Image (spheres, rainbow, N blue to C red):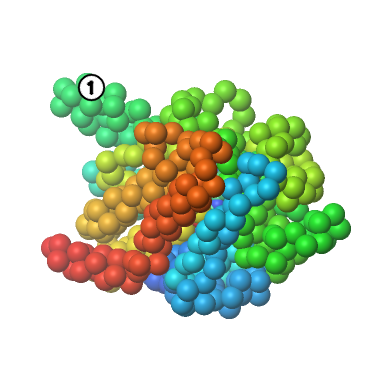
Amino acid sequence: MMTSANTKRLHVAICGAGIGGLTFALALSRYTDIDIDIYESARALTEVGAGIGIFPRPWKIIKMLGLEADLLKVTETKVVDGPVSAFRYRKSDQYEGIEFYTLITQGSLMLFHRADYQQTLLNHLPKRCRTHCLKRLRSYAQRQSGPIELLFEDGTTASCDLLIGADGVKSAVRAGVLGEKAQWVRSEGRQEEALEILQHVEPVWSGTNAYRALIPVQKLKTIAPNHRVLNTPGVQYLGKQGYIIAYRISGGKLINFVAFVVKHHLENTQFNGPWMSTVDNSAFSSIFAHWEPEVQALIACVEKPMQWAIHTVRPMQSFVSGRVALLGDAAHSMTPHQGSGAGQAIEDACILATVLGHPSTNRTNIARALRVYDSIRCPFAYRVMEVSRINGRYFTLQLDEAAGAMDLDKLPPKQQWDNLQQLGSRIVKNWEWTWTTSIDTTLQEALRMLESIA
Ligand SMILES: Cc1cc2nc3c(=O)[nH]c(=O)nc-3n(C[C@H](O)[C@H](O)[C@H](O)COP(=O)(O)OP(=O)(O)OC[C@H]3O[C@@H](n4cnc5c(N)ncnc54)[C@H](O)[C@@H]3O)c2cc1C
């Protein structure tokens, strides 16, 4: 039996030490009267070799957490508050690509190596946040009152006042939360509703596979010294069957490369095969074989990419059950077409830590704080999930989902250009929320709600 400290205001267990779990732990650690244990299934805390982009809303949280100065040491991206060019869009599924739009964001999209971001979080995490590796949660049990009991795959147990499931897309905590809800509605004779609830336990395939690799900048320079990716913040190469995103990270030493192969008609089906595996370029390169030469140059630099079958969580009614709450991908795993999954996990972390850390929250009224978290974060995250899904359509040249991919190649040049312009402005419109809304307003709303509930 693992010990649990009981002398503090609250004892919180976090299941999963990814970006969501660690950011939450750091945000909560500002309240020194809250005890924190982090349980992680992996042997050590590591991140995948890939890049990550953070938009202005979550960046503000990173600033509040005191991470900005250290993160600026590991990126080339400069913090700009006003308009800044983030991505250039090209129609690339032809020999001569067409550059048709630039995504101008209000405030920088900050670009990092994931490992650098995670290391910065770990460097800031106080020692009193106890991290336990090789602890895979199997299940939990909660009653009306008393501690929540945690059971790990190795047979050990632990307890806490509050459990946060930050355990990613295959979340064991989500299975527990939904199991509890299903049991409750079944006890009221609502069998069909129980079955519907349980449909949300297993993630579904988005129909998209991502092929990720890190390319040394020097390698690309050798074969294509004037390549656009070497002197542009970020480029997206679009076509009907997929798209490629490329941007520099690690102080300009590496290029984050992701090729997406998209089969929209297979959305919400089951993927047959491992969700993550190392493959050869042949697993994706044929889709891009006829694309413009600068795409070929990038692919020529890719070695042993990781294939990720992108899975999402079907939207649930709530992230909370009793004194258990979900956060990050466990709650709202989304497609990566808006580069916002981690950003949303960071927002969850910030709002949840704020309501739990509030001086009025204690063991007897945890449900009140979780209600505020749920009512703010659940609808917001699912809206982001939907706009991300729509971006996936735009990035494969679909102006209108019902009409499918535009056959731009059959249009006269003027009409083709007009359609691409329309696509560009829809992409920007779809993304506007990241800079027209502010986390400050959301935080104020959370505090106002908390203080208004008795
Ligand atoms: C190709 C691609 C590109 C992306 N680009 C961006 C981007 O640019 N910007 C952005 O904001 N987001 C991006 N995302 C999304 C982002 O990566 C995720 O949303 C984010 O990493 C989720 O973090 P998390 O902590 O919720 O989950 P995870 O990172 O999955 O962490 C979950 C942790 O829980 C652990 N765990 C799992 N099960 C258990 C268990 N039973 N017990 C204990 N521990 C457990 C795991 O080992 C892991 O450490 C991208 C995603 C993909 C696939």
Residue at horizontal 65%, vertical 70%? 75
- Dividing the picture into quadrants, the one containing residue 53 is bottom right
Q: Secondary structure at mark 1?
A: helix
Residue nearest the viewer, comparing 307 with 327? 307
- Dividing the picture into quadrants, the one containing residue 441 is bottom left
Residue at horizontal 39%, vertical 49%? 387
The residue identified by callout 1 is: 192
Q: Quadrant of the C terminus?
A: bottom left
Camera sees residue 406: yes
In the picture, measured across the screen, residue 377 lies left or right of residue 51, that is: left
Image position, residue 235 (x, y; %): 62, 57
Image position, residue 353 (x, y; %): 37, 63
In the picture, measured across the screen, residue 329 lies left or right of residue 357, that is: right
Residue nearest the viewer, comparing 116 with 15? 116
Image position, residue 325 (x, y; %): 35, 48
Residue nearest the viewer, comparing 427 with 254? 427
